[in-house]
Amino acid sequence: IAGITQAPTSQILAAGRRMTLRCTQDMRHNAMYWYRQDLGLGLRLIHYSNTAGTTGKGEVPDGYSVSRANTDDFPLTLASAVPSQTSVYFCASSEVAGQTDTQYFGPGTRLTVL
Amino acid sequence: GQNIDQPTEMTATEGAIVQINCTYQTSGFNGLFWYQQHAGEAPTFLSYNVLDGLEEKGRFSSFLSRSKGYSYLLLKELQMKDSASYLCAFMDSNYQLIWGAGTKLIIKP
């Protein structure tokens, strides 16, 4: 693989269910990010990780959790999905955190919560 | 506070030139990014400006005025494949990106 992969590509989920969105990168980037994209709004940062073993909250973290056990993987978990979490979710990475590095995006996961 | 604004939609003709504007307000600034996003796909990096002036990359150029909180993306010799959304984002004092809602560019033959 090259770049960032996300799984699943799309998912329909019943409200109240738990869901983990997967993100893997093979660029050995230190920093990783989760965004959601909703119609009419800019990308909004959910959580980020500056390096393996550390995570931080973004603009809209409520209802989401993340972990960063190693450099390559950065899963996003919805503990109990609600309809307002219907969105397209993008994972991104950059070489170094805290600098003006370009962020590279995965293909996205389209999530519908009913 | 922080905010960023760009037009929702623009239309242009194949072969022409189009300028997409972006204005922002922030107390901490570490540069301005432009990304292209085709429908149903991921955003892809186009340009980065941190100093005032024009940066040219082939058919695409990006301009920044920090004193005015203003940037634009200039696309020349438009092609049908340029039909996409163009996202501007500034990097704040915490090195986090604050994104505009995107400008949908429609190219007509």
Image: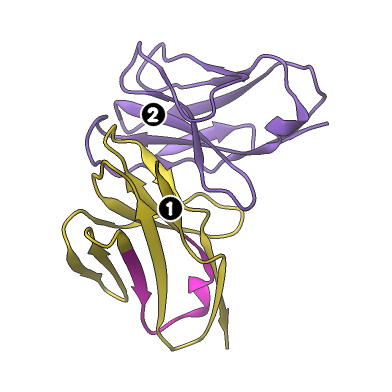
Given residues A41 and B107, the one toward you in this image is A41
Q: Horizontally, is A104 left or right of A86 in the view?
A: left
The residue depicted at 26 percent of the width and 34 percent of the height is A95
- Image x and y of residue A55, in percent: 40, 16
On what subunit does the disc labeled 1 rest?
Answer: B
Nearer to me, A73 or A47: A47
Q: Residue at x 60, y 59 (%)?
A: B39
Give the magenta part as a residue range. Answer: B71-86
Q: Which residue is painted at 45% across and 27% down in the image?
A: A58
Q: Position of residue A90 (x, y in %)?
A: 53, 38
Q: Which residue is mark 1?
A: B4
Could you tell whether B79 is left or right of A21 in the image? left
Q: Quadrant of the C terminus of chain B?
A: bottom right
What residue is drawn where x is 50% and y is 73%?
B81
Q: Nearer the viewer, mark 1 or mark 2?
A: 1
Q: Foreground residue, A40 or A21?
A: A40
Secondary-structure class at tag 2: strand
Label 1 with label 2: CB-CB less than 8 Å: no
Q: Position of residue B24 (x, y in %)?
A: 37, 55
Q: Amino acid at mark 1?
A: Ile
In the rendered image, residues at marks 1 and 2 fall on the same chain? no
Identify by letter the chain in purple: A
Q: Is residue A1 visible?
A: no
Using the image, name the chain to which the residue with label 2 belongs: A
User: Residue B57: within the magenta?
Assistant: no
Residue type at numbered disc 2: Met
Residue hosting label 2: A32
Q: For this view, does B2 lie left or right of residue B39?
A: left
